[in-house]
Amino acid sequence: MPNPSLKIHGARFILTLDPQRRIIQDGSIIIEGQRIVQVGKAQELAQVPAQRVIDATEMVVTPGFVNGHLHVSYAHATRGIFPDDLGPAYLPNVFRLQGAMTAEEEYYTSLLAITELLKYGTTCFLDPGTTKHLDACRQAYQESGCRIIVGRQVVDQPNPINLPVSTTQQAVTEFCWPLCLKLNECGPVSDNETSNSLAGAQKVQFGFCVTSRRISASSVLRST
């Protein structure tokens, strides 16, 4: 079955971010499946057919935005719950609430956050490792189609902000490397294949996230 085609037609400006950093006035974009196959003047692409056409008159088309720091699994669940003037007591309350969330709750709050990101043009984000039920949230990542950098938070020292504490050995041998291998267990797939592996779909990358030198031992820092 051929890939569905889409034409974004007649945009006032297209910001390409190609090596020449071209800005195309009165432009169109042709997309087949998940790939942009043509970008150019609307007049040049006027006769190119597409199953769906979006009229982009007076609009500016840009590549997707990138959010470089987003606690995707709980930020929306805690938004507006705690007063902004709590000072040092704010984060302990946030992490206490997040620590009580179930896998299902984190899955749905992740979907909520990603929906808001996509609504305003963000298609890639980095979560700095505070997701509790990463296996459950992987499904939300896969369903969204976003490009995501996600990690496992590594904390092995008592801390004042209610982050869950593991032993140094657990942090290194039970949490970090097994999860990294799990996320990267399959290789790339072709355009016409599907895969349950996020790494295989080349949508998700994994890293280790050390919150602070004050709450992670030097052995963890060296291992990550």
Image (spheres, rainbow, N blue to C red):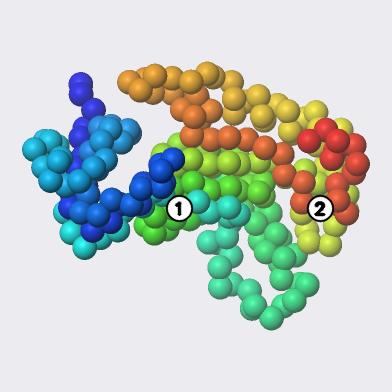
Point out residue 114 in the picture as x, y percentages from the top left corner.
Answer: 45, 51
Residue corresponding to mark 2: 212
Q: How many marks?
A: 2
Q: Give percent across and percent down for residue 112.
A: 45, 55
> Does 66 sit above or below residue 49?
below
Q: Is residue 187 above or below residue 115?
A: above
Q: Of residues 58 and 124, which is closer to you in this image? A: 58
Q: Is residue 142 visible?
A: yes
Judged from the image, the secondary structure of the residue bearing numbered disc 1 is strand
Q: Which residue is rendered at x = 48% and y = 20% of the image? A: 188
Residue type for callout 2: Ser
Q: Is residue 28 left or right of residue 145?
A: left
Residue shown at the point (86%, 47%) measured from the top left: 216
| Amino acid type of the residue tagged 1 in the rendering | Phe
Residue at the image position 20 percent from the left and 35 percent from the top:
5
Q: Is residue 4 above or below residue 141?
A: above
Give how far across and how far down residue 126 sits, in percent. Answer: 58, 47
Q: Secondary structure at mark 2?
A: loop
Residue 52 sits above or below residue 94 on the image:
above
Residue corresponding to mark 1? 65
Q: Residues within 10 Å of mark 1 (few under 14, many from 20)?
A: some
Which badge, 2 or 1, comes first in the chain's sequence?
1
In the image as oriented, which residue stretches furthest toward the right? 218
